[in-house]
Every structure is written in C-alpha cells, then in structure tokens.
Amino acid sequence: MKLLHFADLHLDAPFAWARPEVARRRRANRRQTLTRIIELAEEEHADLLLCAGDLFEHERFTPDTVAFLRESFARTDLPIYLAPGNHDWYSARSPYALTEWSPNVHVFSEPRLTPIELADGLTLWGAAHRAPANTGDFFTGFRADRGGVHLAVAHASERSALPFQESGKEPHAPFDAGELEEAGIAHAFLGHYHVARDRERYTYPGNPDPLEFGESEGRGAVLASVAADGTLTRERRSVNISQVHDLPIALEGCHHLDDVLQRIAIAIAPLSGSVRVTLSGEVSADLPIDPRSLAQLGDHLDGFVVRIGAIVPSYDLEAIHAELTVRGQFARDTLEIPDEERRRKVLITGLRALEGRSDLEVA
Ligand SMILES: [Mn+2]
C-alpha cells in the first residue's frame, strides 16, 4: 500500500505582510501546490492521498477555493481521505459538510477515530476537529476493535515536539507518542506542526508551500509505503511553488545611502519570489536607513520586506574626544576605563543615550 501524505496547506492564508497583489499570488501558489501534490500521487501510482488537516482556513475560505478543491479532487480517481484540523474544523456550515464531493473523497467528520477498511487487514482511522480550539486527545484510551494493521490520519500535537515547533503553537488535540503503541496504531500520519518531523510511529510532513519567512528546509509531502506487517518506508518530496528567501545583509563599510542601496540590490538581484532582508552591522549614526525608502529595490520580486536587525551606529570617536561639548567630556571621562571592550561599550551606549535613543543595547 503506497500513499501520499500532506497537511497544513492553509489555502486562503492571508499573507498580511504582503501587498494585495502579492498576497493574491501567494494564495494562488498554494492552489498550484495542491495540483502538484495530486500530480505527484498519480505519477508515483500512490493508492491513496491523505490530508491531515488545515487544508484551508475556515475563517477565510472563498467559494472559489471550495470549487477549486472540489474540481481538483473530482479530476482524479485517487481515493482521498481528509481529516479536518483546527483551522478547517468540521461543522454543519463547513465546506467539508456542504460540498458535494466526488465519490473518491472521504471526509472524516467524527470527533473520535473512525475506521475505513483500505484493504484486507489494513484499516485507516481518522478523526476531525469539531471546533477551532480545545480539541482533546484522539488516541488516549483508543483500542482498535479488530485485527490487522492500523494506520491513523489526524491533526494533532505530539507533546514532546511542542517546544521545537513555532512559538505560540497551541496544543490542539495533544497526545504522547507512547499512546500510539498502546492504541495499536502502526503509524499516524499527522498535521499541525509546520516543521517536518519523522518518528518511528508518526510523521509530520511540514507545510508543503512556505507560509512564513525563515522556514526550515525539508518540508513537503511524504510518500510512504506500508508493508503487510505494518512496516513503513517513507521519503519526503518537495512540492512547493513559492520561492521564499530570508537574507541577512551586513552593512559594514557602507558610508552613505547609495552604498546601502547597492549592497542590497546586488544581494537580491539573482533572487525571485519573496525576499526578506535583515540589515545589521556597524554603520555611521547619520546613515538614513528607512525600510520604506528601500522598498523599490524589490520591484522585480513577488514580495520584498526590509527588516532592521542589529544595527549599531559607529561614531567618529577621535573627533568626539576633541569636542568641547558634554559628549566630548563624557568621551574623555571613559578613557579611565581600563578594559578596552568595556570602554567602547560604555562610550557608545552613553553617546546613544545622549542622543535620546532608547535602543541602547550595544552588540
Ligand atoms: Mn493546525
């Protein structure tokens, strides 16, 4: 039995950071990613396709997205099993309930694991979130009521992984990995964590198309083969459409704004898709770095975000030491500090405080 597993596509995600036309393009990319996933399943002669939740966002989906989903699923003979998550939770008003899906589509709609017999001796158990929050553990106390090999598809949070996943992730349908063995589940195909995670008894494929800047590599859809005894082999395939780059740029040696513009322009010239640059380094305190004035550099890109990182203003310390001013006197006073590194920190922090700045942390 060969299957393709994905999760967390988040169709109709808002991309609030982006201009409206860019956000629209990013949403279109997510649809293309689904098309690519279905094509991959067909090319690989998978027996079925699993989606472990957060296929779309219940708060934001458009009727057009639902029509797109319906048509995409109807165009293939592939059996498709959908387990609603916390973003696409199942209710009587959900597209899951209201859409006339083609016969190859099965939506798990119960808030507990229910079975589908995939083959003789092979059962797939799936469950649905029925609310956007406070969904309990699907696996605790569960025991398969029959023999054979048992697989599961669900949107759930394995507890030991919570600290490693994106900050602020809520424990939706939390469970402990040990519960799977107790429940007699050979393997659980899960969603919710966007960082890919492969363990003996469960798999998180990761979000198949980028949602955020700075996402780790290695996310995608997982092609898995399950042997008659439940042994699993799997490989992850990249299916992303969006190109997203997160680029740190050091501004050392930039003397004026044109230097900064040129340095950023050179760095982003070979890139396409969406780019976020984070500026850092010690530069003249007079250098006018305003993210808005740099925005047009990214006109050739789908999306461009400039972020000010650890920028430390440099000063002409020799000239300041000679000044007959309060800050000149302050600079001369710091000469009494014997440790050179400490002297530099005190001096720069003091100079910035005298300018009325509140970002006094010196790298
Ligand atoms: Mn989720």
Image (cartoon, rainbow, N blue to C red):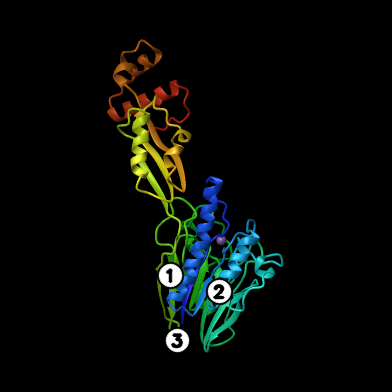
Mark number for residue 199? 1
Discs 1/2, front: 2
Q: Is residue 189 left or right of residue 309?
A: right
Decide: marks 1, 2 in contact (CB < 8 A)? no
Q: CA distance from mark 1 to mark 2?
A: 33 Å
Under tag 2, what secondary structure? loop
Question: As shown in the figure, which amino acid type bears the numbered disc 1?
Answer: Arg
Left or right position of 243 against 172: left
Q: Which badge, 3 or 1, is on the more N-terminal residue?
A: 1
Sooner in the amino-acid sequence: mark 1 or mark 2: 2
Circle 3 or circle 2, nearest the eye: 2
First-in-chain label (3 vs 2): 2
Instruction: Give the numbered dot on residue 228.
Output: 3
The picture quadrant where one finds residue 282 is: top left
Crowd band around label 2 with a 10 angstrom C-alpha radius: few (<14), some (14–19), many (20+): few
Asked if marks 3 and 1 touch (Cβ < 8 Å), the reply is: no
From mark 3 to mark 2, how far is it between C-alphas?
30 Å
> Could you tell me which residue is drawn at 61 percent across and 69 percent down?
70
357 with respect to 139 (left or right): left
Query: In the figure, 13 relative to 264: above or below?
Result: below
Does dot 1 land on a helix, a strand or a loop?
Answer: loop
* Disc 2 residue type (three-letter): Arg
Name the quadrant where ligand 1 sits.
bottom right
Q: Which labelled disc corresponds to residue 322?
A: none
Q: Which residue is at the front of the view, 298 or 118?
A: 298
Picture residue at 44% right of the left edge, 40% below the top = 306
How far from the left and from the top, in percent, is residue 115? 60, 80
Residue with the mark numbered 2: 75
